[in-house]
Amino acid sequence: MKPRKIPLRKCVACQQMMPKKELIRVVKTPNDEILIDLTGKKAGRGAYLCGKASCFRLAKKSRALDRALKTAVSPEIYDALEQDFIKVEDEFIAAKDAVDDDEDE
């Protein structure tokens, strides 16, 4: 049986290509809301970030999300996203570890 192709995405901050499941998606919804999408299925324009807070800070400093989402992201939204990012970072890492454990079996 042919192995499944793993979709790759690029982190907007560090420019590293990684499997889609190892990245956190930030989405601009059709209602112009900007939020973190852990499911990866919300409608809207998406940008991907590594699961590291350092990558988020780099994206904030270089305004990478502004370019990737093709809209101006206000500093208040960056601050709110940073708080959300810190909250979901541990959850994201735990989910990624669970997937890695399942693949090892």
Image (cartoon, rainbow, N blue to C red):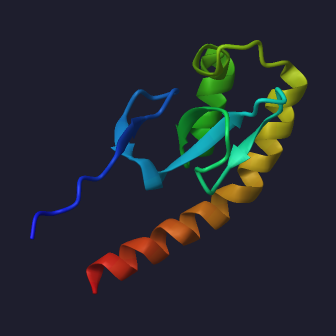
Q: Residue furthest right?
A: 76
Q: Residue at x 73, y 51 (%)?
A: 86
Q: Residue at x 59, y 38 (%)?
A: 54
Q: Residue furthest left?
A: 1
Position of residue 49 in the picture relative to residue 16 (left or right): right
Q: Residue at x 45, y 53 (%)?
A: 22
Residue 43 x, y percent position in the rendering: 67, 40
Numbered label tally: 0
Q: Residue furthest bottom?
A: 105
| Residue 10, picture quadrant | top left
| Residue 48, picture quadrant | top right
- 92 over 68 or under it: above or below: below
Quadrant where the N terminus is found in the figure: bottom left
Q: Residue at x 28, y 80 (%)?
A: 104
Q: Along the line of sight, which residue is nearer the eye, 34 or 57?
A: 34
- 23 over 100 or under it: above or below: above
Position of residue 11 in the picture relative to residue 101 (left or right): right
- 51 over 57 or under it: above or below: below
Residue 56 x, y percent position in the rendering: 63, 35
Residue 90 x, y percent position in the rendering: 65, 63
| Residue 59, picture quadrant | top right
Position of residue 105 in the picture relative to residue 48 (left or right): left
Quadrant where the C terminus is found in the figure: bottom left
Position of residue 104 in the picture relative to residue 15 (left or right): left
Residue 29 x, y percent position in the rendering: 75, 34
